[in-house]
Every structure is written in C-alpha cells, then in structure tokens.
Image: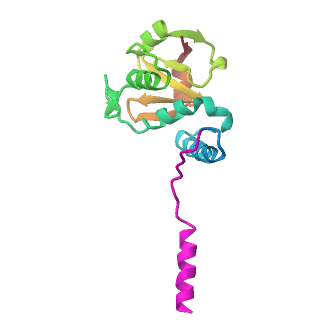
Amino acid sequence: MAFAMSVMAALLTGCHTSKKVTTTDTPGSPNSEVVAVDSYGYLSRRLGISIGKHDKENLELFTVAEKWLGVPYRYGGNTKKGCDCSGFVSQVYKAVYGKSLERNSAAIRDKNCSKIRRSQLRTGDLVFFKTGSSRKINHVGIYLKDNKFIHASSSKGVIVSSLEEKYYIRTYVCSGRVD
C-alpha cells in the first residue's frame, strides 16, 4: 500500500513539472508549430501584447526585443550591459532587419524614416518623443502593437510602455517608418 501511494505521489508530482520542448523538425511541420505556439504565449506575457499565429512575420522582432527587457539605461550605451534609447533601437534594427540607423533620436527620424501618422503605425515602426524641457526629439522607441512600444527609459531601462499613458500622450511627437 505504501509503495502504491509513493508511486501515485510521484506520478501526480510529475504532472506539474515543465519541460522545454525542442524539435529538429523542419519549419511548417506539426511539431514546429508546438514550439511556435509556446513562444507566442511566452512573448505575449513578457511584452504585454497579444501575439498569435497572424504575427508570425514579426516573431523575430518580438524575440530580439524581449531579450533586451530589463537592460539598464546607460547614456551613449548600445549593449546589453547598458543602453540609451537610440542605442537600443539601433541594435534591435540591425539584428532583426539588417539596417544601420543613426545614433540619436532626431537623426533617426530625419535621416532613416518616412514620417507616418499615428493611425498608420505597424509593428516595427518607430515612435518619437520630446521629453523633459527639450525642444527637439530626444527619445525613440519601437512600436510593437496594441498601442505598446518598447524603449530604453532613462529611469527604468528597457521596458514596454503604452502610448496611452498620460506622459507619452503629452510627449509624443510623431511616428516613422524606416526606409
């Protein structure tokens, strides 16, 4: 009886363990879809946005950007040891799209982007702000979706914020699509 109870306890405990699923199947096979669905859920939770199969073309952006969450702010930085907003945006764009961007927010807007209306924002577009007492653009982030963007905040490091927050409503200047 004690043996049966031990076996039963071990089996029940085993139900609550989690396993990392890996597969060597080719993309598009049923097993590769399981991994992708797990990625969608994980990235959705981490980035605070709804990600599904229809977002497959943006999965690389979401994956790369998520790996930067929590990186501390460092003026002039562009590594995972510390970065500023333009350093973060530049590194993500290089990794995901293979594009080199200017190294400050205003220059990125002026030299790398076509201006678009906020209503035209798509995943991967850039959002620009004038913060503090600055009279020129001095902050940039990458639009994710659902009115959320990821950026390097000078007080919190790399975070996801909402364009609907009062602070960002007040400081928002324009949006741009990288050429």
Q: Is residue 20 a member of the stretch shown in magenta?
A: yes
The C terminus appears in which quarter of the rendering?
top right
In the image: residue 37, left or right of residue 156: right
Residue at 46% x, 35% y: name it: 159
Quarter of the image for residue 44 reads top right
The colour scheme used to paint the residues is rainbow
Residue 26: % across, % down: 59, 40
Q: Nearer the viewer, residue 54 or 144?
A: 54
Disc tally is 0
Q: Nearer the viewer, residue 39 or 148?
A: 39
Residue 107: % across, % down: 42, 10
Residue at 63% x, 44% y: name it: 33
In the image: residue 72, left or right of residue 93: left
Quarter of the image for residue 91 reads top left
Where does the magenta region start and end? 1-26
Q: Nearer the viewer, residue 17 or 169?
A: 17
Q: Nearer the viewer, residue 143 or 155?
A: 143
In the image: residue 78, left or right of residue 50: left
Q: Would residue 85 be seen by someone viewing this image from the given angle?
A: yes
Residue with the most extreme bottom position: 1
Residue 77: % across, % down: 31, 25
The N terminus appears in which quarter of the rendering?
bottom right
* 172 relative to 26, above or below: above
Residue at 66% x, 46% y: name it: 30
Q: Is residue 25 a member of the stretch shown in magenta?
A: yes
Residue 115: % across, % down: 57, 10
Q: Would residue 164 be seen by someone viewing this image from the given angle?
A: no
Residue at 68% x, 33% y: name it: 54
